[in-house]
Image (cartoon, grey):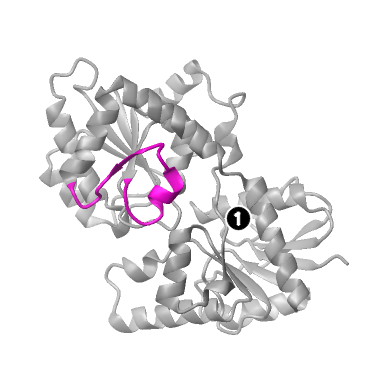
Amino acid sequence: MASHIVIDGRRITDFGIGTYIRSLVQALGSVDRSNRYTIVTTTADQGSLAGLPENFRTAIYNRSDHSAFDHIAFPFFLNSLAPDLVHIPLNRVPLLMVTPYVVTVHDMANLLFEEDTSKIRMQLRRFRFGRGLRRAARVIAVSEATKRDVEHEMGVPAHCITRVYNAPDPAFFSRASSPGAQERKTILERYQINYPFLLYAGNIRKNKNIPRLVEAFAVVRAQLASHPLYKDLRLVIIGDTISQYPAVRQSVIKSRVENAVRFLGFVPFETLRCFYESAACFVFPSRYEGFGLPPLEAMACGTPVVTSNVSSLPEVVGDAAILVNPENVFDIARGIGEVLLDEEVRARMIRRGREQAARFSWNWTARQVLEIYRDVIEQR
């Protein structure tokens, strides 16, 4: 008998979590034509779900999950939909959440690396985080590293946690839709970029380690000051604004690379893909990642990757990236230099990177999530 599954899609246009929601919903639409799905979304974001099959519909709910009243209003709204199961795709579980529900944990950075948060606020956040996980019928962790964190930090029994990997957006793999050389040139000219550059994509919160990335870039730039190809090397950072991160601004000034570092904020998908494909190297020296999707996106685009040897990143990138110590500026610089200057290493990383990224599939992710839905509903 068909079940009714409700998915909270209010963050569908967000950076990161939005990719997860869109990709999972689209993949579920491909693998499951039996169950009924309702995707909860806002009026403004409803268009993001066009093209789904007939067993999918949307329900409009405009209150943010940041609202205190959402702890009451959202469960009341969900009850009106009469679901057999609810999927919360990130750990913002209302205190009065209806059951049964499944929750996806992408990382625990808000608990482990939060900046400028009072002790009381952190205790409340930890309480809400843990309560939401422990009441869930199943917790989906996006990596083995995240699964361990959920078990050890939150006290969730191992048998209640299932590891289900994320995957890059399938569009990153499509050669047919890839921008041609002239189109890439036009996009780069729009941003006045006519020089070789290192790329970082993602937010720039504390755990992302951007100050050390800037310092490592300054070291590499000084080392390559007379290099025929990389003497005007720049660093491009996409996905966040610098205004609310004074430590990053200070690192740029202290390293004396103000004229060589560009902060572009959020960009459209095709622009992001163009930057991935055009970068000399993608550098992602994060101190903590629940999964680490940007390195796989870069690999899918044929760009060599330098990333950290901690948390989930070695698990995700395998032997297809240069791994560095994120606490050591000179080791990050060493990894960048190896990719830029050793053509054999560079070619090997590009080849292995494409193969590694292709191991992750939203179709396979959706099938595993669907199996979790079935198990929870049958147990009910």
Q: Position of residue 236 (x, y in %)?
A: 32, 36
The quadrant in which residue 373 appears is bottom right
Q: Which residues are magenta?
A: 308-328
Numbered circles on residues, count: 1
Give above or below for 151 relative to 131. Answer: above
Q: Is residue 316 magenta?
A: yes
Q: Would residue 87 be found to the left or right of residue 339 on screen?
A: right
Q: Position of residue 326 (x, y in %)?
A: 25, 50
The quadrant in which residue 56 appears is bottom right
**Residue closest to the eye, 4 or 377:** 377
Let me know if residue 265 appears in the view.
yes
**Residue closest to the eye, 183 or 137:** 137
Q: Would residue 250 be found to the left or right of residue 157 on screen?
A: left
Q: Is residue 61 magenta?
A: no
Residue depicted at x 60% and y 26%: 177
Q: Position of residue 230 (x, y in %)?
A: 23, 22
Q: Would residue 84 be found to the left or right of residue 162 on screen?
A: right
**Residue closest to the eye, 36 or 272:** 36
Residue depicted at x 39% and y 50%: 313
Task: Name the residue tied to disc 1.
Answer: 21
Q: Position of residue 324 (x, y in %)?
A: 27, 44
Q: Amino acid at mark 1?
A: Ile
Q: Would residue 160 be found to the left or right of residue 192 on screen?
A: right
